[in-house]
Image (cartoon, grey):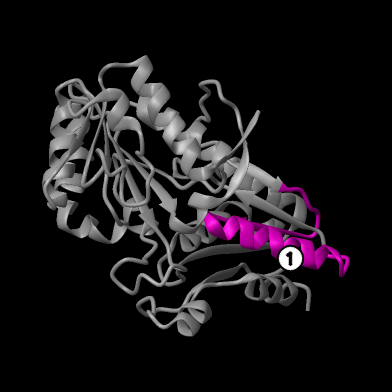
């Protein structure tokens, strides 16, 4: 297997699926010759042309609406928004149209569209370009939510998302674009709803998402030196959620920390914590602890932004609090 960045893995997935299926096309702002705001679609315009890599005006409502309509008509669009923060402009097209068509038309309509969106803080992009909004999408019946943390997972999940007959939200942390890992050159799918254990352990389960998986692994390495064995679980998808993987890990370790970069208030971690409390409470030896960002906008100031983002110290402290 080749070593590739997260960005290259995404590009490979789109290129290979576009070669395999002529119904797959890309739509978004500056996705053509420019190659996308973060370079994820670079080179695809030269290969497939403007008919299948389509630049749009600066109008997220049109991007999402066109993707939903094209999907309902039989195509498989991959729509890109420059930042997840801009989805508010197109929420009607997403949650009232794309998410509900299959249900409201009695199963006769399919909406096989992927909506790719960069999210996350750490690049000094300030409050309107740095949010993590995965919890918004988890609350909408009819769409799936992928949030991969590694290049290999990103490629396999994106291929699955493109082939799926439902709308899929695909969230990519901006810091992860440069992260490297081994990626198979061949086409492969990672089923949505199947999580992964990134590190096995026996003393406490840490369920983490996106960039926070890497932060959790750093914390686990530090804790191992103190004799504390941490199991790091990456759900990879939030809808559908691999409940069985999480519950089995908690039943083994008897303790749970949930970590994400999004604000802790009403975040994905709250749903995971509630699920474990409902289905595995008797296995817990201590209360569930959530690690998330404070309930405020993402600061622009670099020192404040650094303080805002949950780090390994916070996960270490959360794990240790369970053992007191």
**114 magenta-colored:** no
Quadrant (top left/top right/bottom left/bottom right) for the C terminus: bottom right
Which residue is rendered at x = 30% and y = 57% of the image? 83
Q: Is residue 277 left or right of residue 268?
A: right
- In the image, the segment drawn in magenta is 199-228
> Which residue position holds label 1?
285
State whether residue 210 appears in this view. yes
- 153 vs 140: above or below: above
Residue 90 as seen in the image, left or right of residue 174:
left
x and y, in percent, of residue 308 in the image: 48, 78
Q: Position of residue 278 (x, y in %)?
A: 54, 56
Q: Is residue 100 visible?
A: no
Of 185 and 198, nearer the camera is 185
- Give the percent coordinates (x, y) of residue 157: 47, 34
Image position of 299 with respect to 100: above or below: below
From what the image shows, is residue 321 above or below residue 56?
below
Name the residue at 31% across, 66% down.
129
The answer to if 226 sits in the magenta stretch is yes
| Residue found at x 78% / y 67% | 222
């Amino acid at each position: 297997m080749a070593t590739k960045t997260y960005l290259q893995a995404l590009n490979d997935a789109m290129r290979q699926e576009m070669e395999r299926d002529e119904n797959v096309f890309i739509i978004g702002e500056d996705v053509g010759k420019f190659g996308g705001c973060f370079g994820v679609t670079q080179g695809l315009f030269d290969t497939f042309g403007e008919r299948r890599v389509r630049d749009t005006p600066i109008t997220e409502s049109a991007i999402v609406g066109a993707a939903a309509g094209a999907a309902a008509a039989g195509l498989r669009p991959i729509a890109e928004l420059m930042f997840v923060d801009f989805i508010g402009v197109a929420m009607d097209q997403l949650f009232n149209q794309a998410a509900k068509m299959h249900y409201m038309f009695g199963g006769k309509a399919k909406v096989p569209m992927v909506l790719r969106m960069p999210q996350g803080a750490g690049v000094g992009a300030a409050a309107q370009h740095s949010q993590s909004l995965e919890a918004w999408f988890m609350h909408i019946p009819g769409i799936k939510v992928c949030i991969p943390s590694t290049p290999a997972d990103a490629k396999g999940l994106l291929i699955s998302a493109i082939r799926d007959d439902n709308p899929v939200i695909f969230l990519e942390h901006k810091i992860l674009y440069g992260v490297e890992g081994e990626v198979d050159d061949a086409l492969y799918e990672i089923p949505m709803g199947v999580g992964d254990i990134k590190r096995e352990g026996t003393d406490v389960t840490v369920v983490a998402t996106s960039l926070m998986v890497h932060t959790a692994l750093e914390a686990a390495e530090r804790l191992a030196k103190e004799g504390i064995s941490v199991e790091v679980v990456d759900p990879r998808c939030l809808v559908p959620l691999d409940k069985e993987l999480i519950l089995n890990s908690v039943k083994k370790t008897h303790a749970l920390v949930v970590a994400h970069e999004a604000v802790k208030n009403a975040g994905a971690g709250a749903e995971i914590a509630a699920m474990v409390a409902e289905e595995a409470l008797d296995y817990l030896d201590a209360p569930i602890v959530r690690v998330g960002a404070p309930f405020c906008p993402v600061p622009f100031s670099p020192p404040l932004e650094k303080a805002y983002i949950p780090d390994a110290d916070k996960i270490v402290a959360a794990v240790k609090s369970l053992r007191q």
